[in-house]
Amino acid sequence: MAQKDWKKMILQKVRMGFYVLTYPIMQLCVKQEEKEVLFLSDSREGYTGNFAFVKEEIERVGGYHITGIFKKNLKQKRKMRDRFLLVKSLARAKYVFVDDFYPIVYPISFKKGKKLIQLWHAMGAYKTVGYARMGKPGGPKGYNYTHRNYTGTIVSSESIRKDYARAFGIDIAKVHALGIPRTDIFFDQQYASSIRQQLYTKYSQLQGKKIITFAPTFRGNGQATAYYDFSLIDFAKIKEKFADKGYACIIKLHPFIKNRPDFSFQDDFYLDLSEEREINDLLFITDILITDYSSVIYEYSFFKKPVLFYVPDLEEYISSRDFFYDFEKYNYGVAVRTMDELLDGIENATVKEQKMKEFYDYFCSACDGKSTERVVQYFLNEE
């Protein structure tokens, strides 16, 4: 290993010094419990997404004690008392679930038998993450500990196991095509009917409208630098063309995006639901999805409805972030580069059925409405 890589490894341990130093001591004082489950996130405030489904299934199975420790974001500081509680909880739990980048756990040396399971929040394999970003801005440089100590992770299809093994720097044998728990709702007709009714009751201005959902991902290197360039889109033009034609538009920005456009969404056409942590429920009432490099394209493929890829900065995004596959592999809708093309795409939205089938079969084939049950059974019974 190169000298500079050793320095990076040492620096990573120094940054997490409190946890690296206190965990071995706590491990001697606190017994690991065989039925103890711990959920950890530095990007959500409670049991949402995959966490909610896995927790509910573990409770249904019964016999396990569950603890969750959450933070809204990485910048939020922990009090010293909370740091000790986290280390104690880590030492006690046999099963530790994370669903995103979680820096505390990477430089810690866990005893054999502890399960550190990554329930990655995004499905499919779209924009590169982890070690697949090697050499890109914001990507890892040289060797470090990040992601490498997962004992297992899940993916949405057999085809992309290799991509997650590469991204996390782990053996492909630790990557399991068990499906994505939160997609189970897409196969539940009773849930679909109920959530539509709830949303139309809560947001009555959407009732009877053809609903566009604008859901772009962030630009930047990660949570700390995330933003969206709102000069790329003209909200006034969209409203002008479609407000009187029976449309309504939901705005759902990525949770990392903190900047906001110089445009007011306080009217009957726009509804800003960016503060809603999960987007999946909104897809049940979405007729046309506008996105770019967001993994929501995988969830939306379950609905077989039109999607517009609004990508005016495609070349720039490829050079800075890039994809696991050529962009055309993902494009089961219509790619548009200008506002005029976007407006025309909304007006003439269609579905490319064969391309959509190819996309779904490659990226989503392990999702069948029973993913949560498989995930829990596999990891809680794994030796």
Image: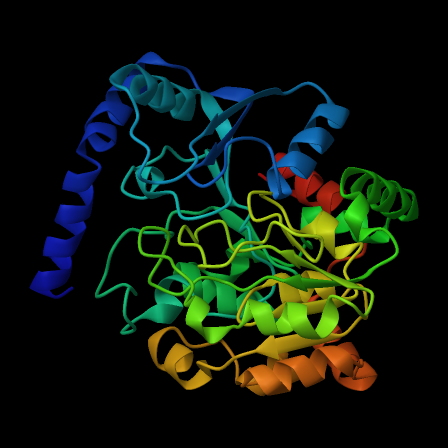
Position of residue 87 relative to residue 149, above or below, is: above
Q: Nearer the viewer, residue 188 or 337?
A: 337
Position of residue 362 relative to residue 213, above or below, is: below
Give the residue furthest to the left: 3
Q: Nearer the viewer, residue 195 or 41?
A: 195
Q: Nearer the viewer, residue 292 or 164?
A: 292
Residue 201 in the image: x percent, y percent?
Answer: 83, 39
The quarter of the image holding the C terminus is top right
| Residue plotted at (43% across, 35% down) | 72
Residue 335: tell me if it is visible: no
| Residue plotted at (87% across, 40% down) | 194
Tell me the colour scheme of the image. Answer: rainbow
Total numbered labels: 0
Q: Quadrant of residue 249?
A: bottom right
Residue 235 in the image: x percent, y percent?
Answer: 57, 67
Residue 336 in the image: x percent, y percent?
Answer: 59, 85
| Residue plotted at (39% across, 39% down) | 73
Q: Nearer the viewer, residue 204 or 365?
A: 204
| Residue plotted at (83% across, 65% down) | 246
Residue 244 in the image: x percent, y percent?
Answer: 78, 67
The quarter of the image holding the N terminus is bottom left
Left/right of residue 42 with respect to residue 178 in the rendered view: left
Residue 243: tell me if it is visible: yes
